[in-house]
Amino acid sequence: MHSALFYRPGQPLSLPELSAARLDGHVIEVGEGFMPVDTVESAADRAVSIADLLPPRTAASGHSAAWVHGASDQPPRVHHATRINRSRPRTYSSTRIVYHEHRLDADDVQLIGGVAVTTPLCTATTLLFELACTGGDDRWLRGLLSALPRLDGELRAHVEPITRRPGIRAAKQLLARMLADQEVVTR
């Protein structure tokens, strides 16, 4: 979609004007912005909608990347960003962003709509190990695996050879359970 059709509050319409247009059925809310109701929402639109939230030299990751890739129709409440540059930012603090300090490899990042986002495989791996180590809601990983059907095989092939990483045993068991559940649903 052309950037002229994506509206951020204050550019050129104010938030009250955009909210009124949404109530009138002229625009829909996409992440941190709005777009005309008769356009099709894409991964690029979702990525562009959170571009202003991401700190410089970071990529959308975790739940945010899963949302960009189509894991859910609603964005996460708090977005995740991971460093992609060698230099570290001095300080970054926001209640809207969880900043991850480790640096991503170039192969783990792709540009979507001009915004750096972790690849589906990197995103799924991150979500899997987060679940294995801390538990929590698995809807983002399940949503990502159902949105991108070939990703489950790629994720299995990527995780199988890993032997030394915190939570690897739990991650492999969790992945096996999730893929078995997914096979039952598709039958």
Image (cartoon, rainbow, N blue to C red):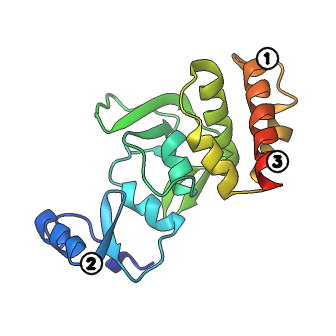
The residue most toward the bottom is 38
> Do the residues under discs 2 and 1 have CB atoms within 8 angstroms?
no
Mark 1–mark 3 Cα distance, whole angstroms, equals 28 Å
Instruction: Give, as a three-letter code, the residue at label 3.
Output: Glu
Quadrant position of the N terminus in the picture? bottom left
Q: Residue 12, image x and y in percent?
A: 17, 73
Figure check: 114 above or below 146: below
Instruction: Give, as a three-letter code, the residue at label 1.
Output: Arg
The residue tagged 1 is 164
The residue tagged 2 is 25
Mark carried by residue 183 = 3
> Do the residues under discs 2 and 3 have CB atoms within 8 angstroms?
no
Q: Residue at image x 56%, y 20%?
A: 134
Q: In the rendered image, which quarter is residue 90 located in?
A: top left
Q: Earlier in the sequence, mark 2 or mark 1?
A: 2
> Do the residues under discs 1 and 3 have CB atoms within 8 angstroms?
no
**Neighbours of disc 3 within 10 Å: few (<14), some (14-19), many (20+):** few
Q: Residue 74, image x and y in percent?
A: 43, 54
Figure check: 71 above or below 14: above
